[in-house]
Amino acid sequence: MRSTSSRYGAAAQAFHWLTVMLVLAAYVLSKGDQDSLYSAAADGLRRIHEALGVLVFIVVVLQLLWRLIDSAPAKQPMPRWMAAAAKLVHFALYALLIAIPATAVLGTWLEGIPLTLPGFDIAPQIAKAHGLGQLIMEIHTTLGDAILWVAGVHAAAALFHHFYLRDEVFQSMASGRMND
């Protein structure tokens, strides 16, 4: 469950890979323009997309709390620029994982639209401001695209470590079966 000096524990791995799956699923379900996303025909997909967004936020908060009590594996030796780039990408990922759901809720409410989840809606908790709501929803969409690029860089770096540098960076987050 807990991390060792060379590997992330089962909980950290579960948070990581669950986040990956939830983000990808939410992204796939978000395709289309904002008007069609809020049409009656897209109501079911929108509800699933919004539920996935809420789940992403909850998983990320739990992951950050878990990081407070579970230490990360020892740092792999690497050039200073590479370590700095890794920190920057991790920071960007966490910032996006928090900002994307936050902008969705804020933009939706500013548009006067309730947050729709399976089985219930959460009415807007702030005054309607249509222009600002549209702007924030555009920011939400842009951040949603950006996270795929940043995550892609993150994944490419992990593969670079595994196949080219042949160090233990990738294995530290992969399941134990990768080493068998």
Image (cartoon, rainbow, N blue to C red):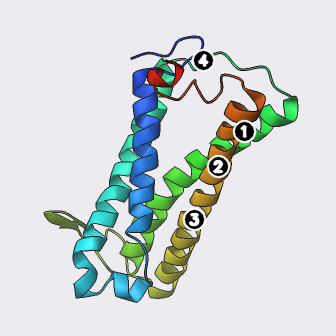
Q: Where does label 2 land, which residue?
A: 92
Q: CA distance from mark 2 to mark 3?
A: 11 Å
Residues at badges 1 and 2 in contact (C-beta under 8 Å)?
no
Pointer 1 or 4: first along the chain: 4
Pointer 2 or 3: first along the chain: 2
Question: Looking at the picture, which amino acid does disc 1 mark?
Answer: Phe
Pointer 3 or 4: first along the chain: 4
Q: Where does label 3 land, which residue?
A: 143
Say which mark, if any, is on residue 39: none
Looking at the rendered structure, the secondary structure element under dot 4 is loop
- How many residues crowd around disc 4 within 10 Å: few (fewer than 14), some, or many (20 or more)? some
Q: Position of residue 93 (x, y in %)?
A: 59, 48
Q: CA distance from mark 1 to mark 4?
A: 19 Å
Say which mark, if any, is on residue 73: 4
Q: Residue at x 78, y 32 (%)?
A: 83
* Quadrant position of residue 155: top right
Say which mark, if any, is on residue 160: 1
Q: Position of residue 145 (x, y in %)?
A: 57, 66
Question: Looking at the picture, which amino acid does disc 2 mark?
Answer: Ala
Looking at the rendered structure, the secondary structure element under dot 1 is helix
Q: Is residue 59 left or right of residue 84?
A: left
Residue 89 position (above or below residue 135) = above
Q: Residue at x 24, y 78 (%)?
A: 43
Q: Is residue 170 visible?
A: yes
Question: Looking at the picture, which amino acid does disc 4 mark?
Answer: Pro
Pointer 2 or 4: first along the chain: 4
